[in-house]
Structure formats: C-alpha cells, structure tokens
Image: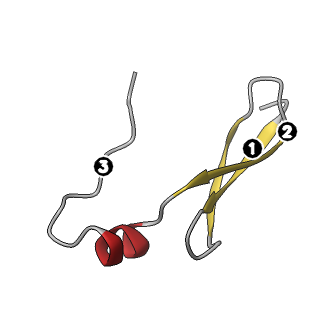
Amino acid sequence: MESVLKVICMYCKKAMGQKDGKGVEGESSSICPECWAKHWPGEPYPEEDKQ
C-alpha cells in the first residue's frame, strides 16, 4: 500500500483498521458491528464487498 486510509466508525469513532487509499491518504468513515447492532437491531451486519 502506497497510500493509506484509516477507517473509523462514524458513530463511536473507534478505529476499524486501514485500507488502500488508491492514491489518497486520510480517513474514511464506516460503522462498527457494535454501533450497527445498536442502531439497526435485528438487521444483519453487511459483509464487505469482495469484488
């Protein structure tokens, strides 16, 4: 990885890891499983796109 995006939960700000920034550095927001369960109870946590 030449550039890195830090992934953080948009609700609790928990660090969720890193991903290839494809030329861009900084932060990207997502939602952690704990916040997903709190905000959408009963809905399955979406799986990462594997394409």
Question: What residue is rendered at 74% in x and 44% in y?
Answer: 5
Position in image of residue 18 (x %, y %)? 67, 50
Quadrant (top left, top right, bottom left, bottom right) of the C terminus: top left
Label 1 with label 2: CB-CB less than 8 Å:
yes
Position in image of residue 3 (x %, y %)? 83, 33
Label 1 with label 3: CB-CB less than 8 Å:
no
Position in image of residue 41 (x %, y %)? 21, 73
Indicate the secondary structure of the residue bearing disc 2: loop
Vertical order, 20 against 39 (above or below): above
Q: Nearer the viewer, residue 2 or 5?
A: 5
Residue 35's quadrant in the figure?
bottom left
The residue beneath circle 3 is 46
Indicate the secondary structure of the residue bearing disc 1: strand
| Residue closest to the far front | 39
Q: Is residue 41 left or right of residue 49?
A: left
- Residue 25 has which mark? 2
Q: Is residue 11 left or right of residue 26?
A: left
Question: What residue is rendered at 30% in x and 49% in y?
Answer: 46
In space, the residues marked 2 and 3 are separated at their CA atoms by 25 Å
Q: Amino acid at mark 3?
A: Pro
Q: Residues within 10 Å of mark 2 (few under 14, many from 20)?
A: some
Number of numbered discs on residues: 3
Considering only order in the chain, which callout, 3 or 2, is on the residue closer to the N terminus? 2
Question: What residue is rendered at 55% in x and 71% in y?
Answer: 11
Q: Is residue 31 left or right of residue 47?
A: right
- Residue 5 has which mark? 1
In space, the residues marked 1 and 3 are separated at their CA atoms by 20 Å
